[in-house]
Image (cartoon, helix red, strand yellow):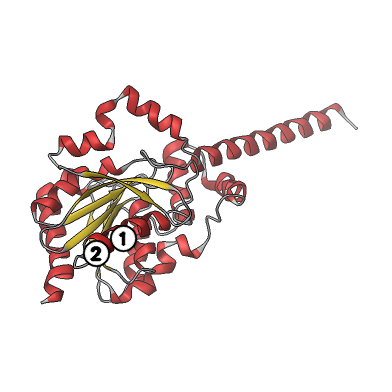
Amino acid sequence: MSTSFWVGTTIIAAAGLFVLGVSYKNTHQLLFNPPEVRQARYQAEPEKHPQQRFNQHGVAARQLNLQADDGVKLKARYVPSTIDATIILLHGYKMDSGEMASIAAMLVRHGFGVIAPDLRAHGDSEGTLITFGQDEWQDVKAAADYITTHEPDSTLGILGNSMGGALSLCYAAQDERIKAVVAQSPYASVRHSLKQGIKHFTDLPPFPFVPLIRMFSLPYVDLDDPHISPLAQMPVLKGKPVLILMGGADEVVEPEGAEQLFQAGGEMTRRWFEPELGHVAFHIDMPEQFEHNIVEFFSNSLLHSRN
């Protein structure tokens, strides 16, 4: 065979190996968040530790030690309610409960209780592997169980950012104790999120990298599992009040996914769309309107419904 054939074959093989290598590396970065990396970050920037973030916002949160059903030990921040209504706050991907500190402060001002866990493989909680809800639902259940035990008269709502918003929708579909859901910048499905996220974080094209990342993820988590897909779970939520927040300038999550979620929901599903806002920006860029709308939503859903 000619030299040009072997050169071409070598180039194609090298390109294939490069694509596989990049996909494997990105899969590892996507799914793993080691405790030593998180703790090193807090040591370098102690003001970013969740407890410090709550203190900065004037929230006298109690630190809790929780345990998920599978034995994973979790940290959470908790403020009891004065009006018998508590909101579970779920942070986003590779964030921690400190991300929710300003929202917690807002809710506490109005008498709501809050419980904000560090999901497994995040913050101060145990774990290394992120499964986008496949295992994290147990972390949310641990928080809900704590409130049910210690505040049995408290009605439960849930509010999450980004991945936490997606997890909020999926978990609320499975737990009848959750009476209302707010999801800020949720993705419609993990696959949907990967297509947008890989462009934003790596500048790589969705094809062929997204299919390969999904393949490399299979030993750890099925990213196409309908149980971790908010879009697949929305029909189950038709009987619960749901509020979906999405910014049209979101570069992390595809904004059209929020429309799909809204269309899949029932009469009690509402949306708040702001074309100029980016990812998880409502409480930052529109704090007064955010406070009014969220407090009104939870008050109507959790308090007025009891009267």
**What crowding class fits label 2: few (fewer than 14 Cα within 10 Å), some (14-19), or many (20 or more)?**
many
**Residue 166 appears in the picture as rendered:** no
Q: Residues within 10 Å of mark 1 (few under 14, many from 20)?
A: many
What's under tag 1, amino acid-wise?
Answer: Ala
Percent across and percent down for residue 220 are 57, 49
Task: Please determine whether, in this image, residue 263 is positioned above or below residue 45.
Answer: below
Above or below for 258 versus 195: below
Q: Residue at x 43, y 51 (%)?
A: 193
Seen at 52% across and 55% down, the residue is: 223
| Outermost top residue | 44
Q: Is residue 5 left or right of residue 209?
A: right
- Name the residue: 47% across, 42% down: 127
Q: Which mark is residue 144?
A: 1
Residue 48 in the figure: left or right of residue 17: left
Secondary structure of the residue carrying numbered label 2? strand
- Residue type beneath disc 2: Leu
Identify the image quadrant of the C terminus: bottom left
Quadrant in the picture for residue 192 = bottom left
Q: Are marks 2 and 1 in contact (CB under 8 Å)?
A: yes
Q: What residue would you read off at disc 2?
A: 156
Q: CA distance from mark 2 to mark 1?
A: 8 Å
Residue that lies at the very extreme toward the front in this rendered image: 150
Q: Position of residue 87 (x, y in %)?
A: 22, 58
Element assignment for label 1: helix
Left or right position of 1 against 71: right
Quadrant in which the N terminus is drawn: top right
Quadrant of res 182:
bottom left
Instruction: Give percent across and percent down for residue 4.
Output: 81, 29
Q: For this view, does 240 lie left or right of residue 73?
A: left
Picture coordinates of residue 303, whole percent (x, y):
13, 69
Quick one: 132 or 150, which is closer to the camera? 150
